Structures are given as structure tokens and as C-alpha cells.
Amino acid sequence: MQQGAKKTILMIDNDRHFLEIYKSRLEREGFRVVVAEDGEKGLKIATKEKPDLITLDIVMPIKNGLETLKILKENLELKGIPVIMLSTLSLGDYVRNSLDGGAAKYLIKSHTSPSELIREIHDILLK
């Protein structure tokens, strides 16, 4: 990664194993990673941390990803933060609702390796 301050990634996902693997890989790439296991905690962390990018799952307890995305994009302080939806759901409605709701990208977990996610993050952060 380029010199300068580390970029902060907030990962919101209720799959602990997934979070551990991807957090470790992103940190090795030079990112600072914070995690939340549900949308409500994710919103609190986003408000406090103001991350450079958020990855967001759809199926989670308390607040699902679409509800969380809507709240993020309605918040004046947070709406500019790019969000990558990273979900197991591949149905067109979820993809369309996510992108229409302001997500920068929709990736399907089973089709996305840590390296591919890192490439997408770099592409979005360098725009």
C-alpha cells in the first residue's frame, strides 16, 4: 500500500470465521480493520471511527445489511463512505436494492477471494 496514514476498513458481518480470515488478510495488506457483528454495532463504530470504506453483509441479526446501508446513506457524516456489499445472497433483488441504495459494489462471498476484495477496495479508494 502507498505511504501515509493507514486506511481504515470497517467490516460488518456476523460470520466470525469470515471476519478473522479477511481482517487478517487486509491488515497484512496495510489496512487498519475494525469489525462489527451486526448492523447496529456497525453504525455505532462507523459514527465513531469514520472509516475510509465499509464492507457490509446482508443477512445479520438486529439490523440487516440493507437497513444498515439505508441509515448510513441518510447520515450526512457517513453517506460519503463507500460501501461494498459482501454477501452470500446472489439474487437480483438484493444486488439491485444494494446498488440503488448507494453501495459502490456488490460482491458474492463464495466468488470473492481476499485478494479480489483487496483489489476492489484499492480501486474504490483510489477513485
Image (tube, helix red, strand yellow):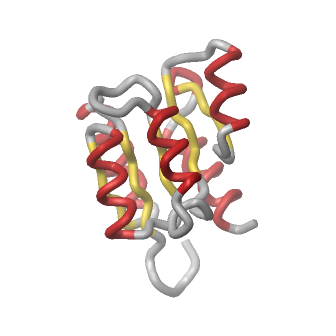
As drawn, 5 above or below 97: below
Q: Quadrant of residue 99?
A: top right
As drawn, 16 above or below 28: above
| Image mark count | 0
Give the camera-side residue of 35 and 29.
35
As drawn, 17 above or below 122: above
Say left or right for 99 vs 60: right
Give the camera-side residue of 1 and 98.
98
Task: Give the x, y percent position of residue 14.
Answer: 29, 32
Q: Residue at x 47, y 35 (%)?
A: 67
Task: Give the x, y percent position of residue 71.
Answer: 49, 47
Q: Residue at x 63, y 33 (%)?
A: 98
Give the camera-side residue of 20 and 81.
81
| Quadrant containing the C terminus in the rendered view | bottom right
Furthest toward the bottom, the residue is 4
Q: Residue at x 60, y 42 (%)?
A: 116
Task: Give the x, y percent position of residue 9.
Answer: 44, 59
Furthest toward the top, the residue is 91
Say left or right for 15 vs 124: left
Q: Quadrant of residue 15?
A: top left
As drawn, 120 above or below 127: above
Give the camera-side residue of 99 and 4.
99
Q: Quadrant of residue 125?
A: bottom right
| Quadrant containing the N terminus in the rendered view | bottom right
Q: Residue at x 29, y 38 (%)?
A: 38
